[in-house]
Image (cartoon, rainbow, N blue to C red):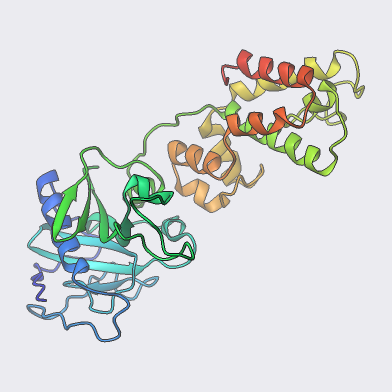
Amino acid sequence: MTTRCRPHRPRRPGQAGPDLDPDQLGHLLDGLLAAWSDLDPTDPAPPPVEQAGPEPADPDVEGRDGWTGSTGPAPDAPFPLAVGVVGGDPTEVELAVRELDGPDPVSQLYGFVAPPSWTAFGVVAPGRVHPVADLAGGPNHPRDPDGSGPDRASRSVVVGLLVSRRGHQVSATRGAGRIEASGEPAQGRLPDACRRALGLPTAPPEARVLELWSVLWLERVLASRLVDPRACSWDEVAWSFPGCGPGSDSWPDARSGSAATDRLRAAAEVAQQWTWRDLRRVHAAGHVASFGVHPADAAWMDDGMFSREALGGLPRLDDLVVELRDLLAPSVVAQLERALLGWGLA
């Protein structure tokens, strides 16, 4: 295999490069997928890569936090790889690459800020494509006898995502010698992380903060029921709402009568006044629970990404309701569902 990515004219450190339009970004991603898909990261002796010209060193990148400069894919490049692009011509670019290993490669991008000279940023990674029916097995697509190993109809692919400085985004999959471009911009943690690395906004929050509070509430109720399966009252369930416990403010400590329901209603009203920006800022300052997000990462994220990250590590609200239907009395479940319906969450 031959990969030719000629070095462009050097820039001063921190100098911004020209932007890539969607077509240029797509051509560049096609080239990256074609180059990477010809390499087998498990091959102990992969073929050499011929490069035109000396390998340049990006002064904003070289030797910094695991990033290495390159004019093309390294033959022993680990997978997946984060890729920084320097240059506005897809045929003459410099690449900065970094291995993303570990159980959660996307989280290794958190907190990273791309140098101003980078014109695009993304990730290239290997994967496998399975027919939908093949995921569960079946007579048409049998699995190996022990249930392991690739399905017969599956195929190896290389997937890629690139985001430009202006927010243009392209994603594609290469396998069996062809490239399939995605019709719509990809959504999820990886596109969010790539956009934040370039200082770009992500999509706005889809959910309200009250949904997060409600998920934490029902998760707490579920955990208590699994530890102590004895029947519990609606008052006990209501008191479990975050910020609803007695003794922390001027609310009465009594756990009977209408006190719990009244306080639940008041706590929910307070939760509805919170925005994701409010929550992200106090979380970044270390004043609230983690939600699985490090405070420094919360400061790096924007409101949309933070909302999805906070909720993404928790069970779905409707799944929790289904679980609790088997653990709570029908009258208690009815009150719980009535509360969620009143908040617009059911």
Task: Report x, y in % for residue 253.
Answer: 91, 24
Horizontal side of 54 relative to 141 (left or right) equals left
Image quarter where the C terminus lies is top right
Task: Report x, y in % for residue 265.
Answer: 72, 16
250 and 124: which is toward the camera: 124
Is residue 64 something that shows in the picture?
A: yes
Horizontal side of 66 relative to 121 (left or right) equals right
47 and 288: which is toward the camera: 47
Is residue 266 something that shows in the picture?
A: no
Residue under the point 90% across and 23% down: 255
The count of marks equals: 0
Against 312, is 48 above or below? below
Image quarter where the N terminus lies is bottom left
Task: Report x, y in % for residue 44.
Answer: 30, 85
Which residue extends farthest bottom?
45
Which residue extends farthest front?
139
Residue under the point 75% across and 34% down: 221
215 and 248: which is toward the camera: 215
Horizontal side of 252 relative to 125 (left or right) equals right
Task: Report x, y in % for residue 195.
Answer: 33, 47
Specify the quadrant of the image occupied by residue 240.
Answer: top right
Horizontal side of 283 relative to 29 (left or right) equals right
Residue under the point 51% across and 33% down: 277
Against 317, is 101 above or below? below
Specify the quadrant of the image occupied by residue 69.
Answer: bottom left
